[in-house]
Image: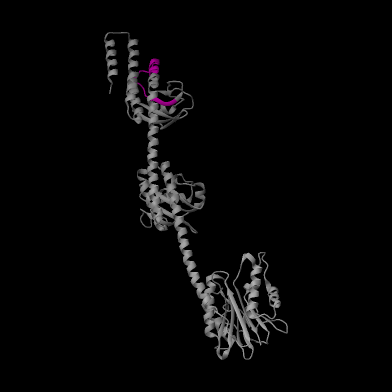
Amino acid sequence: MTVPVVQKCREELESLRREGREPALVSRMSQLVSLLDLTTRLGWTARGDEIPDAALSFVMGEMGVESGALYLGTGERRFERRVARGIARPLPHQLELGEDIAGAFVPGSEAGALAEAGLAIACPVRKASRLIALVGLGPRSDGRPFAPEDVAFLESLAAMAAVPLEGGLVDDELRRVNRDLSVKVYQLQNLFDIGRELAATLDEDAIERLMVTTLMGHFLVARAALYHLGPAGLELAQARGARPGTLPARLPGDPVALVRDVPGPRAVADLPACELKDALAAADFALVVPLVATGRLAGLLAVGARPGGRPLALEDLDFAAALARQAQAALEGARLHRLRIDKERQDRDLEIARGIQQGLLPKAPPHIEGFEVAGLSRSCLHVGGDYFDYVPLSGGRLGLVIADVSGKGTPASLMMASVHAWLRALAGSEPAARVLERLNRFVYASTETSRYVTLFYGELDPAMRRLAYVNAGHVPPFVVRSGGPEQRLRCGGPVLGLLDEVTLEPGELLLEPGDLLLAVTDGVTEAVDPGGLEFGEERLRQVLAAEPGAGAAATLSALVAAVDAWTGPSGCSDDLTALILKATF
């Protein structure tokens, strides 16, 4: 469209031509009108992205050429093609000139690619000293070469176009910034909405499904998958948009090394060559997003190609990274919640088990004419594998038991409960040795080969002051005589549960007034101080010798206090169990 002022000037110029005025004057005035027309047209162009096309079209018309291209500057002597017209040969999208450009030039050594595309002349467009564009034109339609005055006119056109082109560049930049801001606002809103959904659930599977479907919706892709990093590598955990069996159940290669080299979201095509890249490409994935928890790789999110093969922009990668961080934080929260619930349930179960185990221990020592009995069992953990028991037998006799099951914690406590029940059922039915031989068969048949129990079992006949006993691999009990040397009760045989059949040797002991029998588990003798030194049997003897006239309960209390003082703040390293029998008269 021609504005009235320019139209008026063109009419006056045509009048001068008809009057036969001097051709040089008419030509000069024609160029001035063209410059005015160019400035007016570009000034009236509303959109900045339309200015390069309008400028090139006008210059081509004024210079009488049918082909041309306009490049906008992107840096020092670097240009990017914005518009091209009438060029049949390949024309580079980007151009870099190795020398400074003073004015219009014939494309050759400075821009050979322009000459190869058929352009005959090029002219830089400057604003002050800054190079902002480059205009290239093909040969003139009438075949005439470009005269010096044509070059001067082209330079004038370029000078007049500089301000509108710079304004167009500014307008383009503002539009790009506004577009980027709009994208960021949209992404932040999405992340905010997703964050609320993630915070509303503690279901790890639901969080992973939401993460996968969100990325699919954001990128408008048809498939996505989530892989967990396990002992065997990256294993498929979630998949959307792919037929069953079409995605690899396990991705090959070293994902940890890959993420070390590629710490954030990356297009699969940009990954370094490796087995993992080949597998992702073969499955038609275009984007990979590492999932990192507490600084360590937890998995990978793989996203399919976008429709039409559209490339991933920087803001897309930023969105994927932000979503991965947000979802991974939600997953970590859900995992910790699950662990807390599991821990609470485990604590409740252990408390129940502890109550059951404590219920198996004697509530109070029995009254035995001429004897005192005291016992204690204290677990190092919540539950343990030590126990002691008093078993009433026929004829006023009393069974005494102290045992130590291999291992600690819940497995040991379960085995201890079984041994307690079996022994209670067998005690008194046969001689002590035969009772433990039968118990051995039960333990061997019912437990793992690595499980065993050490056990001391004695049957006290108070009337005869006689103790018939069997020691199955247990710490030999101490017998302190009121008027004689210490004695250890070793008769018996191997531990119970390791062999199918065992033969145990019975033992017998007569107890005189003042005699004391002490049976302990290795949690007493092997208790260690903070420096790692064991309590040992010698210190146990010192406790027994300190108060030779003390009763069973007082001796037991002194022993436990000595062990606790020895271990100090470090506490126990094993269950502690002791059983004392003392003859009083």
Residue range (magenta): 131-153
Residue 518 image position (x, y, % from top left): 65, 79
Residue 583 image position (x, y, % from top left): 65, 85
Return the residue nearer the eye: 485 or 130: 485
Residue 402 vertical placement versus 198 (above, below): below
Which image quarter: residue 465? bottom right
Quarter of the figure that contains the N terminus: top left
Question: Which residue of the protein is positioned furthest toward the right in this rendering?
Answer: 484
Residue 306 vertical placement versus 467 (above, below): above
Residue 518 visible? The answer is: yes
Return the residue nearer the eye: 229 or 41: 41
Which image quarter: residue 407? bottom right
Which image quarter: residue 384? bottom right
Q: Is residue 141 magenta?
A: yes
Residue 64 image position (x, y, % from top left): 33, 20
> Which residue shows up at 70% across the image and 80% down it?
548
Quarter of the figure that contains the C terminus: bottom right
